[in-house]
Amino acid sequence: MAAVARVKVRRPGTGRVIGDRFVGRALRIYLPLLVMLVVTLFPFYWMAITSFKSASELFDFSVSPLWVREPTLDWYRHLFTQTNFPRWAFNTAIVAIASTLISLFCSILAGYSLARLRYRGADTIGWGIFVTYLVPPTLLFLPLTFVIRELHLFNNLWALILTYPTFLIPFCTWMLMGFFKGIPRELEEAALVDGATRIQAMVRIAIPLALPGILAAALFAFTLSWNEFLYALIFMNDSLVKTIPVGVTQELIHGDEFFWGELMAAALLGSVPVAVLYSFFVDYFVAGMTAGAVKG
Amino acid sequence: MGTAVRAKTAPAWHRRRVRIYDREAPLGYLLLAPTLVVLGIFLLYPFLFGIWLSVTDSELGNLGSFIGLDNFRFEWRNTDGVFYTAVVNTFLYTGITTVFKLSLGLIMALLLNQAFPFRRFVRAALLLPYIIPTVLSYEAWRWMFDPTFSVINWLLVNTHLAPYPGPNWLGVPFNAMAALMIVNVWRGTPFYAIAFLAGMQVIPVDLYEAARVDGATRWQQFTNITVPMLRPVLLVVLLLSTILTFADFQGPFVLTNGAPYNSTQLLSIWAYQWGIPGGAISLGAAISLVLFPLLTLVVAGVLFLLRRPE
């Protein structure tokens, strides 16, 4: 009986049915979840333990390779002293922050304009921006090399700061439009009636209320630019201006020789900022990822 | 509230501006201006320029002259069938991974929608592959697929699932393609799961209660309530995911880069190989442009499959 009473409090479709005992639950929920968790997390585990293994242990499969016997920080030391990794990390951070700020500025204004103001062509432009989201970088990178060359931006971080917004803005605008539409129009109308200008209404009322959406958009933009690879691969050839993804894949491999310990140490460190940011703001991430999906 | 109080004391000239700004078109376009400028220069212009490039014999830093459809002709005839391999692989890669991502994502979402301890933690952990830089996690996979020191093979051999030395993952065409797909599914499934989970959480509880009162089984509830209610989410997710998978570059580039012998070649990688290391930018543009009509076909297909049954 207790089980029946509890059904109503639970989320849809999750209620316990009478007769659903522990064994059934374990087989139906815990076992598949466990399998998924192991498959999902194993590559990260492997990445981590590899980075702490010594060179000889790395290729010793006579005993179980799933554990580190004598952990060492050699690879990390080598990464920081013998490679440009610190520089790549710095570049990645600069590019991610700058392109996120530019994209946020553009998409807050555009999102507000498209969601709130009534004028001719707004719908068409809104669709146009959505369609650009469907144009993948794979289609653009070759002609873009000419544009970057024209602007003399090869081996210059500005090349990335200016091109990343092309895939960030459509996404952020689309997401923020949803958030702006969720704010009751009456709040701004009241301010307008009381003599505020439209811009004041936007800056003082709509934007503060859309802050959760803006934060979600910012997190997404930052993560996407931190992870970007194709443009950085093509526009950045000088080792000192590379970003982490490009530096790690291009410079830590010498010919046919893979320094897996060092490579995995770099991969782990390159993932940490995004992972930390993400673990603090999981709910914003989820809200951001699904804003378009659920509302659209 | 603060605004209302302060606005009462606003001077008369301030009031007049309300009416001016009420005509919203100028402000509307003004606010759109930065976005349109950025997208115009770095997206629309390159896109159109790319179409022009594909009918010229340009190289990097050297604008060529018009040569008609020669690039496309070369692509079809003079590349020992690599073009066909790339097209077929691109479709297989998108189609097969989408089926798996869709079904595994749905299962993952159904599981996460249950009540169990550490639910938040588990949800966060399952999303990780989608968040971590693709290139970096793919490097870990490449190490796991190492020809001699593959930890996957060590596990397979030690659990007697495969005879020693285990499959050569990246050296055999079929295996390499399978490896590409496995890792893509590993990375893409969480996106589906999270979107489905969000979709499930906005389905009204009453529907399930009514169904339960009428004696519907769990499976009937799933097929008659959950699935139809997820249709709008499914549409958006499927659209975004197929496009991104179709044009996927970074993962396959890191893992196989078309090897062995062009057998895992995809249009995106092939375009890069001709365009940047090969220097034949116009040919690369012609190859990547082939993606576009195919992409349109795929998008149309998705929209058609998910049309409202009326």
Image (tube, grey):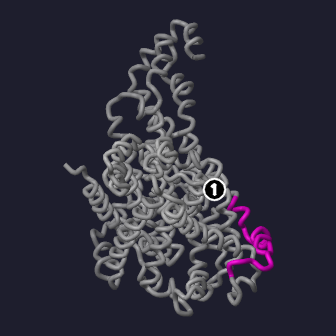
Q: Which residue is drawn at 56% across and 81% down?
A: B145
Q: Residue at x 61, y 58 (%)?
A: A156
Q: Residue at x 71, y 62 (%)?
A: A87
Q: Name the residue under label 1.
A: A274
Locate residue A188, reporting x and y percent: 48, 22
Give the residue type at disc 1.
Val
Locate residue A195, reporting x and y percent: 50, 13
The residue most toward the left is: B310
Between residues A173 and A45, which one lies in front from this camera angle? A45
**Snapshot quadrant of residue A80:** bottom right
Q: In this view, does B41 lie above or below A59?
A: above
Locate residue B129, reporting x and y percent: 56, 63
On the picture, is B86 further left or further right than A287? left
Q: Residue at x 64, y 70 (%)?
A: A248
The residue most toward the bottom is: B164
Locate residue B22, reporting x and y percent: 41, 19
Report the magenta residues as a range: A65-89
